[in-house]
Image (cartoon, rainbow, N blue to C red):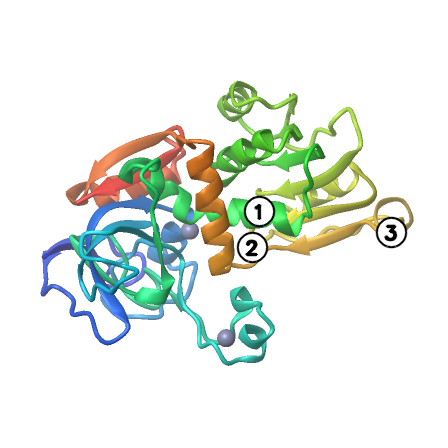
C-alpha cells in the first residue's frame, strides 16, 4: 500500500510503498477513505513531541471502511472513525474510575502506533466509532479529534443550555465547538487573533467578537481557551462570573502568569485543563454532529500531498481543516 512515512522527527514525510498492515485479534483493518490533519501531527513530525515509534505513519482522524476483522456490530464495509486515543489498558486506577482519558498506558493513533496517512490502517475494534450517514467522509474526518476534544472542553467547562460562553482562540476545535453551543442556545463570545478568524466566528453566530485578550462585554458563565498562552487563560478567568469555569484546551502553555487570587479566583471560580478524550465523548459528540448536520470547512489533499497538507496547517494557509484522501 501507499503511505506517508515519518522516518525521523524533523524529516519530511516520505511517500512509500509498504506492506499492508495485518489486523490481529480484536483489531479491524480499514481501507482509509479520508484522514484529517491535526495540529498535533505537526508537533509529532517536527519533533516537539518525543518520538515513540520508528518509521511512523501519522494521522489520527481516520474515516475508513472495515475490510477485515468484521463483527456483528461492525460489519464488512461499515464506515467508522478512529481518533487520537487508539486504546487504553482498561485496568489502571484511572480506567477503573471511568476516567479513561487519563489512562496510565494509552495508545495514541498516528503517534505510538501507525495512523491514517495511508491507504490502509488497523485499529482496535473497541476504539472505532460507527459513522452516521449524515456525516460524509470529508466532513466527518476533522470531527474526529478537533471536534471531539472541543466538545470535551465544553463538558469540562460545565456548559449548560443557554449559558454565556467565551471561546478564547478560534481555530479548528473552536469553530466546531461553536456549532454545538449554538444548538444549545448558548450566547457565544469569541476573543481571537487574526481578522479572518474573527470574521469566521461572526459568520458562525458569535454574539460578540474581539481581539485575543479582549474582555467580552458581559460576565461569562463558562470559558474555553484554545491558544497556548497563559495570558489568554488569565483574560478568560477575568471574564468569569462567580462559580464560573475556564477549561484550557491546550497541551502546552507558554507559561502561567501570576494573577490576583482575591479578584480572579476567589468566588469559587475554577481553572481546569482538558486532556485527551473518552469513548463516550466521541460517541455523544458524533451523535450531536449528525443531528445538527455539522459541516466543517475542509480543503482536500491527496496522499502524495501530505507534506503540503501539514505545511498548510502550520502556516494557517487554509480556512477550516485539511483532509487527506488517499
Ligand atoms: Zn488505563
Ligand atoms: Zn488531534
| 83 relative to 171, above or below | below
Q: Earlier in the sequence, mark 3 or mark 1?
A: 1
Mark 3 neighbour class, 10 Å CA radius: few under 14, some 14 to 19, many 20 or more: few
Mark on residue 43? Answer: none
> Left or right: where does residue 306 sit relative to residue 38?
left
According to the picture, the residue beneath numbered tag 3 turns out to be: 261
- Relative depth, front residue between 12 and 165: 165
The percent coordinates of residue 71 (x first, y second) are: 24, 65
C-alpha distance separating marks 3 and 1: 22 Å
Q: Residue at x 56, y 76 (%)?
A: 96
Residue projecting furthest to the right: 262
The percent coordinates of residue 160 (x first, y second) are: 69, 41
- Relative depth, front residue between 53 and 298: 298
Q: Quadrant of the C terminus?
A: top left
According to the picture, the residue beneath numbered tag 2 turns out to be: 252
Cβ atoms at labels 3 and 1 below 8 Å apart? no
Mark 2 neighbour class, 10 Å CA radius: few under 14, some 14 to 19, many 20 or more: few
Q: Quadrant of the N terminus?
A: bottom left
According to the picture, the residue beneath numbered tag 1 turns out to be: 228
Q: Residue at x 67, y 43 (%)?
A: 159
Q: Residue at x 60, y 73 (%)?
A: 97
Q: Earlier in the sequence, mark 2 or mark 1?
A: 1
- Relative depth, front residue between 163 and 224: 163
Q: Secondary structure at mark 3?
A: helix
Q: Secondary structure at mark 2?
A: loop
Q: Earlier in the sequence, mark 3 or mark 2?
A: 2
C-alpha distance separating marks 2 and 1: 6 Å
Cβ atoms at labels 2 and 1 below 8 Å apart? yes
Amino acid at each position: 500500500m501507499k503511505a506517508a512515512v515519518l522516518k525521523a522527527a524533523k524529516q519530511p514525510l516520505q511517500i512509500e510503498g509498504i506492506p499492508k498492515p495485518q489486523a490481529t485479534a480484536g483489531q479491524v483493518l480499514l481501507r482509509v477513505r479520508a484522514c484529517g490533519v491535526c495540529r498535533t501531527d505537526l508537533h509529532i513530525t517536527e519533533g516537539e513531541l518525543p518520538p515513540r515509534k520508528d518509521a511512523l505513519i501519522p494521522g489520527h482522524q481516520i474515516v475508513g471502511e472495515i475490510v477485515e476483522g468484521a463483527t456483528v456490530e461492525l460489519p464488512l464495509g461499515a464506515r467508522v472513525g478512529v481518533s487520537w486515543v487508539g486504546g487504553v489498558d482498561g485496568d489502571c486506577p484511572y480506567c477503573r474510575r471511568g476516567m479513561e482519558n487519563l489512562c496510565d498506558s494509552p495508545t495514541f493513533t498516528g503517534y505510538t502506533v501507525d495512523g491514517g496517512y495511508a491507504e490502509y490502517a488497523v485499529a482496535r475494534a473497541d476504539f472505532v466509532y460507527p459513522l452516521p450517514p449524515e456525516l460524509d467522509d470529508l466532513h466527518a474526518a476533522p470531527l474526529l479529534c478537533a471536534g471531539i476534544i472541543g466538545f470535551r472542553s465544553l463538558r469540562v467547562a460545565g456548559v449548560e443550555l443557554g449559558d454565556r460562553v467565551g471561546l478564547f482562540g478560534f481555530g479548528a476545535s473552536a469553530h466546531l465547538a461553536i456549532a454545538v453551543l449554538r444548538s444549545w442556545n448558548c450566547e457565544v463570545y469569541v476573543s481571537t487573533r487574526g481578522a479572518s478568524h474573527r470574521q469566521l466566528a461572526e459568520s458562525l453566530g458569535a454574539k460578540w467578537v474581539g481581539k485575543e485578550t479582549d474582555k467580552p462585554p458581559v460576565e461569562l458563565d463558562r470559558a474555553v481557551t484554545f491558544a497556548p498562552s497563559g495570558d489568554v487563560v488569565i483574560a478568560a478567568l477575568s471574564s468569569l462570573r462567580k462559580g464560573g469555569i475556564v477549561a484550557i484546551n491546550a497541551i502546552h502553555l507558554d507559561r502561567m502568569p501570576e494573577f490576583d487570587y482575591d479578584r480572579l479566583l476567589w468566588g469559587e471560580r475554577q481553572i481546569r485543563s482538558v486532556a485527551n478524550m473518552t469513548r463516550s465523548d466521541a460517541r455523544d459528540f458524533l451523535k450531536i454532529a449528525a443531528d445538527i448536520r455539522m459541516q466543517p470547512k475542509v480543503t482536500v489533499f491527496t496522499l502524495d500531498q501530505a507534506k503540503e497538507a501539514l505545511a498548510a496547517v502550520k502556516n494557517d494557509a487554509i480556512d477550516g481543516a485539511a483532509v487527506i484522501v488517499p
